[in-house]
Image (tube, rainbow, N blue to C red):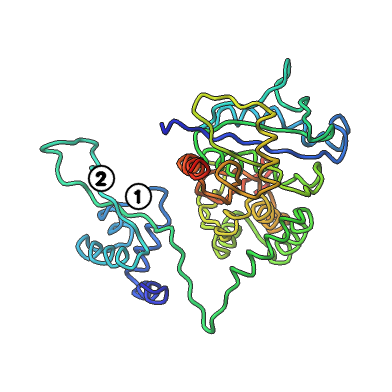
Amino acid sequence: MEDIEAIAVLQDPVRRRLYDYVAAQDHEVSRNEAAEGAGIQRTLAAFHLDKLVDAGLLETESRRLTGRSGPGAGRPAKLYRRSEAERQFSVPARDYRVAADLLAEVAEAARLDTELQAAARREGRAAAGPIDGFAAAEALLAARGYEPRMDGEVLRLTNCPFHVLSERHPTLVCGMNLALLEGLTEGTDGLRARMDPRPGLCCVVVEISKNKSD
Amino acid sequence: MTGHQLAQLNVGTLKFPLDDPRTHGFTSMLDTLNEVADRAPGFVWRLIDDGGSDATAIRTSLGDDVLVNMSVWESRDALWDYVYRSGHLDVLRRRAEWFELPKAAFQVMWWIPAGHIPTVEEAVERLELLRAQGPSPRAFGFRDTYTPEDVSAAADTVRT
């Protein structure tokens, strides 16, 4: 399926809700859970979930939820998770990825880590504006595509907006990303960005500092 | 278990001596880094100098100011996750503070039979091979996707 066709599948508000719900979870989602999450009937959810799978936006696997196997264990449940595939479409056609990759390759070879981090920090500061409190920070991070999720005392960022670049030039790009987030959170009261890399997530978390006043 | 493990060597030329205050940011992190490595999934072995807890005292034909770091992993992904998706990344991003801009390839990896512990000399040879001839199944980098099978295939080609 072409990118534009796959993206068009999300035009339906019910599908969009299901997609957003599945994408926001830290686990694979059953039909029942997805239906409940999107506030629709199970059969309707099943129909739309499969449309999302056909479009390559979600992936599915079958597993027995109870952990039982053999006869009497019942049919395995279908579980959904967001697909890793990236979809993008631009009119007129644009290709910033190739440009970014070439620039990163040169910056990496010249080891411009410090210079890039300084530029990213400036960008973060400029984009921050007044951030009043944790919820505002969360909204700002969400708007920038980080998909923040509370995990104990920290906001874990579950999506890397620079994913492809960060896999190809991790040291350079993850350092840039941290500096950007440091710039964004610098003026806030009691929020601090730090590195806490884990496979499959953004390499940065935002934590509430101990001396938080509100 | 495939019968193979991945060996890696990376080298760096310090900007300042090891005991210089400007290198302290790096040296103060070493124990933590090595602990993370030792506990990392897929970690097999790392080079440690006699009587030490790391490899900072080891010197090679590459030069007196060149630090070496060498380890063995169960897979390429296990090594990648340690290097770029563990606490190691937090140190890596500050590499420009402590290390000179490398003029040639500074890391190399190659497949070894499981259980083999490579020597530093062997590792330096692999790095020299990568520098001289570019990536091959016998000496490659993270961008390359050579498998252990590629090594034997290449060896067969040489023989015939």
Amino acid carrying label 1: it is: Glu
Q: Are marks 1 and 2 in contact (CB under 8 Å)?
A: yes
Using the image, tell me which numbered label, if any, was put on residue A63: 2
B68 is higher (above) or lower (below) than A214:
above
Q: Residue furthest bottom?
A: A92
Could you say where residue B156 lies in the image, as x and y percent from the top left?
47, 41
Task: Please give the chain letter of the residue carrying mark 1.
Answer: A
Using the image, tell me which numbered label, if any, was put on residue A28: 1
Residue B85 in view: yes
Could you say where residue A54 lies in the image, as x and y percent from the top left?
29, 66
Q: Nearer the viewer, residue A156 or B140?
A: B140
The crowding category of the residue bearing disc 1, from other C-alpha atoms within 10 Å (few below 14, some 14 to 19, many at least 20), is: some
Disc 1 on helix, strand or loop? loop
Q: Same chain for the residues at labels 1 and 2, yes or no?
A: yes
Q: In the picture provided, is B42 more to the left or to the right than A80?
A: right
Give the mark toward the camera: 1 or 2.
Answer: 2
Task: Please give the chain letter of the residue carrying mark 2.
Answer: A
Q: In the picture provided, is A45 more to the left or to the right than A10?
A: left
